[in-house]
Amino acid sequence: MAQTWIILGATSTIARCFARQLADRGEGVVLAGRDIADMTATAADCAARGALLAEVIAFDARDSASFKPILARARDISGTISVAIFVGSMPPQEQIDIDPSLIHGTVIDSFTGPAEFLGLIAPLLEERGSGTIIGVGSVAGDRGRIGNYVYGAAKAGFHTYLSGLRNRLGRAGVHVMTVKPGTVDTAMTWGLEKLPFLARPEKVASDILRGADKQKDTLYTPIIWWPVMTVIRLIPERIFKKLRI
Ligand SMILES: NC(=O)c1ccc[n+]([C@@H]2O[C@H](COP(=O)([O-])OP(=O)(O)OC[C@H]3O[C@@H](n4cnc5c(N)ncnc54)[C@H](OP(=O)(O)O)[C@@H]3O)[C@@H](O)[C@H]2O)c1
């Protein structure tokens, strides 16, 4: 059934691929983010591919005043509304170690901003008794590592939030999926060295879409990250604290 997706963080490399894939299926997209020019170009592309609707709206995770206009627009769109959240930021951990005030913004971008928005829109989806919420977390949220433990902590918080939201909204017929990508070739990882199993954003976007269609609760993408993280989670802390992985 055709539905309209509100995509937060629509300038994300993965989100752009995701929006195009939705448009190819004739679904609607409302692209929300900070860079209006970038999103306007993606919206034009989505419209040309046959999207039911292709619009752009301002969203800044650090400015909750930007949330209500999106909610108002969603109320005016009939049918099923779904939400996909790609927002996140990962300042280098060494920079955060020097300036811990960076923690606050990282946590807002990757956890509390999206969670506050979801808290506002959840009643609309509950009322309509349909829709999907996709929250993009990260394998980094599965265990605190020396290289990105602030980003990882924010994502771990987001995972726990999504788990509770799934428990709540499932009762109303709304599905919530947590996505845990491994390393993906995007702006976020540009210039980083030694990235294992680096995936293409198109592949991650299609995994996400397929996972949502199958109503997966948690999705590791690419799938290799499921066994990898199962092993990493099992390493005893006394050994793990000495590793650099
Ligand atoms: N790339 C990876 O290896 C990887 C691995 C695991 C998980 N992830 C997650 O995948 C998601 C998409 O990331 P990506 O790899 O596609 O990287 P990306 O291209 O850097 O995307 C990050 C997105 O977050 C947006 N954003 C950051 N702070 C924001 C704020 N305050 N308000 C609104 N938007 C904000 C960015 O908007 P601007 O364009 O305006 O900056 C951009 O759209 C993120 O949640 C990321 O944590 C990525």
Image (cartoon, grey):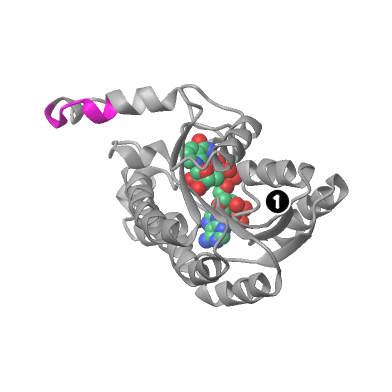
Quarter containing the C terminus: top left
Q: Residues within 10 Å of mark 1 (few under 14, many from 20)?
A: few
Lateral position of residue 236 relative to residue 10, left or right? left
Q: Which residue is tagged 1?
A: 1
Q: Residue at x 26, y 30 (%)?
A: 233
Q: Residue at x 36, y 51 (%)?
A: 163
| Magenta segment includes 221 | no
Towards the viewer: 155 or 241: 155
Magenta residues? 232-238
Lateral position of residue 172 relative to residue 147, left or right? right
Q: Residue 245, can we see it?
A: no
Q: Residue 198, can we see it?
A: yes
Q: Residue at x 62, y 30 (%)?
A: 203
Say what secondary structure mark 1 lies in.
loop
The quarter of the displayed image where residue 146 is located:
top left
Q: Residue 47: percent from the left, percent from the top?
A: 84, 52
Q: Main secondary structure of the magenta part?
A: helix
Lateral position of residue 186 relative to residue 123, left or right? right
Q: Residue 139: percent from the left, percent from the top?
A: 39, 36
Task: Indicate the amino acid at tag 1.
Answer: Met
Q: Residue at x 73, y 63 (%)?
A: 56
The quarter of the displayed image where residue 83 is located:
bottom right
- Residue farthest to the left? 238
